[in-house]
Image (tube, rainbow, N blue to C red):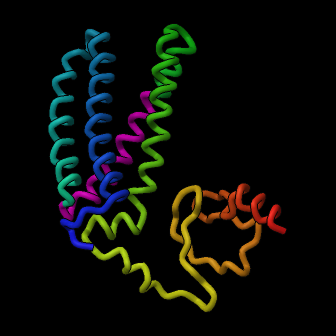
Amino acid sequence: MGRDEPTGELAAAHRQVGWMFIFTVGLVLFLISVDLASIPQLSSFIVLLIPVGIVAIPISWGFIQRKSWGLGFMLVSWFSLTAVVGILAVVDLGQGLTTDRWSLVQAALLLFLTWSMYQRTKLLRHPMFAAWYHGHPTTMLSSIPLADGEILASCPHCSSLLAIQPDRLDVGEKCPNCDEGLILKQTIAALSEEE
């Protein structure tokens, strides 16, 4: 797959991650500046937030342009940003439980954003996405050595790439990454109806 070749789902997911990063950095900077502005002794630190926003631009732009260094920088930045959003959610939850009820709503939204960012982390770390990002043919996965009877499959929950033996797969098998069942309940029900 060439670097300029348009691809559907991976290209769309790539764009979404880039723009979500920019939006989330802006949101976090705004929330922190509002909190700092309410504390007169710390309000001068708002100026220190400007370089953080400026640093986020080349990281997201490098990622969106698929520069070779962009994916690594985005992963580190994404983990850091997810942690900051999670911390802001916990702080708002604490404020909401004691004094400010609006903070409960904000905490719920930030917790949802943290969860959503965590889900996107799985995409950024997926070998298929990394191969696409760096312009390698995604058919390179066919060169992965497999034992007799093994095939490559992805977990239906976290999309981890796994080597499985379909004839030995049992209903109780769990994904080693997310610890969810490898066979969906709907599939088990459909197979039971056929028998």
Residue 81 part of the magenta-drawn span: yes
Quadrant, the C terminus: bottom right
Image coords of residue 84 (percent x, y): 38, 36
Residue in the image at 69% along x and 63% along y: 183
In the depicted view, which residue is nearer to us: 183 or 80? 183
Looking at the picture, how far across and down is residue 80, in whole percent?
A: 36, 44
Q: Which residue lies furthest to the bottom in this view?
A: 148
What percent of the width, then of the height, locates residue 3? Answer: 21, 68
Answer with the quarter of the image where residue 20 lies: top left
Quadrant of residue 166 within the rendered picture: bottom right
Classify the position of the N terminus by image quarter.
Answer: bottom left
Q: Residue at x 28, y 74 (%)?
A: 136
Whether residue 143 sits left or right of residue 37 in the image: it is: right
Q: Residue at x 43, y 83 (%)?
A: 142
In the displayed structure image, the side of residue 60 where residue 132 appears, left or right: right
Q: Is residue 87 above or below residue 137?
A: above
Compared to residue 126, the image places residue 27 above or below, namely above
Extent of the magenta region:
67-88
Q: Main secondary structure of the magenta part?
A: helix
- Give the total of numbered labels: 0
Residue 54 vs residue 24, the one in the foreground: 24
Residue 30 lies left or right of residue 192; in this view the side is left
